[in-house]
Amino acid sequence: MRSIFLILFSSLLIFSGCGSKNKTEAAEFFERGNYHFKKREYERASELFSEALEKVPDFADAFNNRGLCFEKMGQLEKASADYLKAVELDDSFSQAKLNLAASFVHLGKPNKSEDLFKSLEKTYADSSQFYDYRGQYYLQKNNPDAAISDFQRSVSLRGPQAETLTNLGYAFYQKREFDEAINSFNKALKIDEDFPYALNNLSAALAQKGEWKEALKYSEKATNENPGQLNFLNTHVLNLIENGELEKAIQYHQSTEKLSPKDPYQLRNKAVIEMKSENLLEATAILSGIEETNPEVEYLYYYLGLATQESTEACQYFKRGAALGDRRSQKAFSTCGN
């Protein structure tokens, strides 16, 4: 849910298999790459690190720093491959290991990072960056308690940061502790009032409490800050629907459908639009398809219950949603049999 912030290390680790001229030229390319990286000229920096690697192919720091450039340019697979190469060349290169672990988390491959985090725990016992990264790992492993502990440790080491507080709020969200989540998101927004992830997540937490009007205010801000972000758009579409702004919702939904035709949250919103348009059979078919592949989608069983016209079946859907902690399903299920 957040971009990974990585630190540039400029130490030179040049191996003895290359001539002194190549070493000198590689060092020059490396330092020039660092200079352009600091100026946020990532493409140029990556080219210079590549030049360094042509001179000294086993230059671990150049692989690590080129990986940083790829990370900044959104080329995550290439970044991860460079971090891995740096670690293979120098098993003691702790920062490259941390970058590699973080890249696996960012790529949605948390299992690959587990051993790396374990090996680095003592080295980075006082590093807020380490706890931020491992906290994200725990979020992906659906271990919010461990994530909360790590994010709180990060805050104690470095002070409150918007990204850390947003991740902390998301961990509380995973636990369905929405008041704590809202508190963390609001703290993040006091630091950076335009931080889009905090805006989006605050909107989602408010919606969970049924505060749809307030939720819409924040999802609108989030989409304005980052209009091409699918998750933000999906949140905003549902808020528009629940606030009775169906025409606007349809317009935004068309954008999400183009961005990702098979995204389950986009499909859920499509089903709700169909339901609001009284196309209940179409809505039920879409929602049933989501249930087969992504039963964790929020509000899925609540909307399935609303879409079905058979009361016993509807109550079964509400019951499933209630078991997942969906408050609207819980409320609907409480009326079953009455």
Image: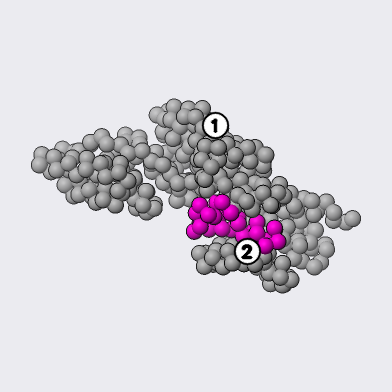
- Per the rendered image, the range of residues in magenta is 220-245
Vertical position of residue 35 compared to residue 253: above or below: above
189 sits left or right of 207 in the view: left
The residue lying at 39 percent from left, 53 percent from top is 74
Circle 1: residue type: Gln
Instruction: Indicate the position of residue 23 as horizontal and vertical percent values.
Output: 14, 40
Q: Which mark is residue 316?
A: none
Q: At numbered mark 1, what does the secondary structure look like: helix, strand or loop?
A: helix
Task: Please state, as top left, top right, bottom left or bottom right, where the C terminus lies in the image.
Answer: bottom right
Which residue, given by chain and number where applicable, does mark 2 sit on? 249
Which badge, 1 or 2, is on the more N-terminal residue?
Answer: 1
Residue 234 in sight from this viewpoint: yes
How many angstroms separate mark 1 from mark 2 (CA)? 37 Å
User: Measuring 57% from the left and 47% from the top, which residue is drawn there?
Assistant: 199
Q: Quadrant of residue 253?
A: bottom right
Q: Which residue is mark 1?
A: 152
- Residue shown at the point (71%, 70%) measured from the top left: 277
Magenta span main SS: helix
> On the picture, is 90 further left or further right than 229?
left
115 vs 201, nearest the viewer: 201
Q: Residues within 10 Å of mark 1 (few under 14, many from 20)?
A: many
Between 206 and 115, the one nearer to me in the picture:
206
**Residue type highlighted by circle 2:** Ala
> Tag 2's secondary structure?
helix
Residue 123 position, x and y percent, is: 40, 29
Picture quadrant where residue 62 is located:
top left
